[in-house]
Image: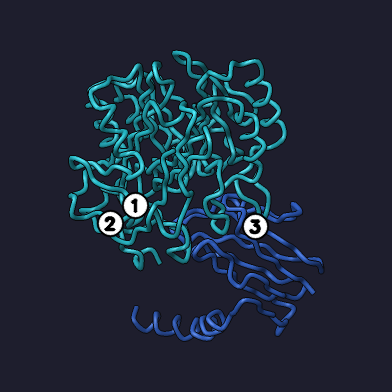
Amino acid sequence: MTRHNAWFVGLLAPVMIAVLGLAGSTTVTAADQSSGVAAEVKIDNFSFGPQTVTVPVGATVTWTNRDDIPHTVVSTEGVFKSKVRDTDETFSYTFTKAGTYPYFCSVHPKMTGTIVVK
Amino acid sequence: MAEKNRDLIDQNLQDLNDDGIDRRGFLKCMAWAGTGLVWTMSGGIPVSRAFAKSADRTAGKSADFTFVQISDSHIGFNKPANPDVTATLQTAINKINAMPQPPDFIIHTGDLSQLSKPSEFDTLDQVLKRASAKQIHFVPGEHDMLSDNGEQYFQRYGKGTKGTGWSSFDHKGVHFVGLVNVANLKAGGMGSLGHEQLEWLEDDLKGRSTSTPIVLYAHIPLWTIYPDWGWGTDDSEQALSYVKRFGSVTVLNGHIHQIMQKIEGKVSFHTAMSTAFPQPAPGTAPSAGPMKVPADQLQRVLGITDVNYLVSGRSLAIVDSPLAALEPSQTGGGMAVLESTLR
């Protein structure tokens, strides 16, 4: 059990470091296009962070709600729409076309963000 | 985040008496100044400084009728800020049932539930059933519209309403209008009433005598309190333009889980405490998220609003009661001064 956990943490550590490095805007490059690229957006204190994320075509973006209040992730142009996400719940969407995707929380519309797909 | 702000939001009581609205003069309060309003204590109950004197004069008068506003019960919320919101709602109902003059009805200004779940609405119904006032008027909060475009809410509480749940009714000469400003919200915006509802409101008020007291109620404040947190309604100006000709207008809102008030001419704006958890004063925390206060202080920042109406003076007296009273020595922390003049 303990050994198993240690292995798991070792695998996760680089991912955690990558996530912690995210600032107001970030670009995720395609290290391995075939397996798909993942990017993370944290919902914290009624804001999406990073507010702008740039990813390659085919990338999957995952939003995680860290607030004590439910939020949603809704494309302003109707491209994607999450169900309501309570604390620690996630929503993922895979972007298959290049473009700029503005989105917001339909519960708290002052919360806005953008995914840029190149 | 919320832990950083340990200061209690003071509870308060305000009393717009019989010369508060109808007299030629008017109470003019500086709206929102800094981090809050100063309230004084009178007989163990917090009283707003501006209205304390007038409250004394009305003491002993009984109101022609009374109604109670409750708000933001958030049934289903179970985070540290209040792990038992059902219990605190029950306390609020007990407080209503113990009122010396039973209210004619209750208005719930939204966020009945936390996640719009049928089980949450079921629990709410169970608790509200115990209220002595059998008639309850509802408007939805954004938490009641989280799934199925608010279908659950409408099936249960929207009977006889129009559009996304707006409605009006008359009670003993007062015209009440319940508005919905949590539907179809736009990216980057605040609360929104929308064109269709505004047209309905204009039509609803048309032809009514200017001497009819008007009470507007909606979830999100119909005045701009703090745009950065979305605490306002984008098109409320238009709604308010329709009530300007009336001699007495009272606007009751929830959403911000704390008491705020402003008087502008003949229009009196007021927000109610939540029965579930407090939220920080505007700009005093990184976000508007639930504010955690020590467990023994929670019931001092939750409460109900009791509105008394006197036909003789055609005015409303608004009394905010926390679920548990503050000790006089505990007021004043972190409050800014309310500048007010009585003309």
In primary-sequence order, the first of circles 1 and 2 is 1
Amino acid tagged 3: Phe
The residue drawn where x is 58% and y is 35% is: B180
Q: Is residue B121 left or right of residue A48?
A: left
Q: Is residue B269 above or below residue A20?
A: above
The residue drawn where x is 27% and y is 29% is: B57
Distance from disc 3 to disc 1, alpha carbons, whole Å, reads 36 Å
- Badge 1 local density, few (<14 within 10 Å), some, or many (20+)? many
The residue drawn where x is 65% and y is 77% is: A25
> Where the N terminus of chain B falls, by quadrant?
bottom left
Asked if labels 3 and 2 touch by Cβ distance under 8 angstroms, the answer is no
| Chain A image colour | blue
Mark 1 — on which chain does it sit?
B
Q: Which residue is mark 1?
A: B38
Amino acid tagged 2: Gly
Amino acid tagged 1: Val
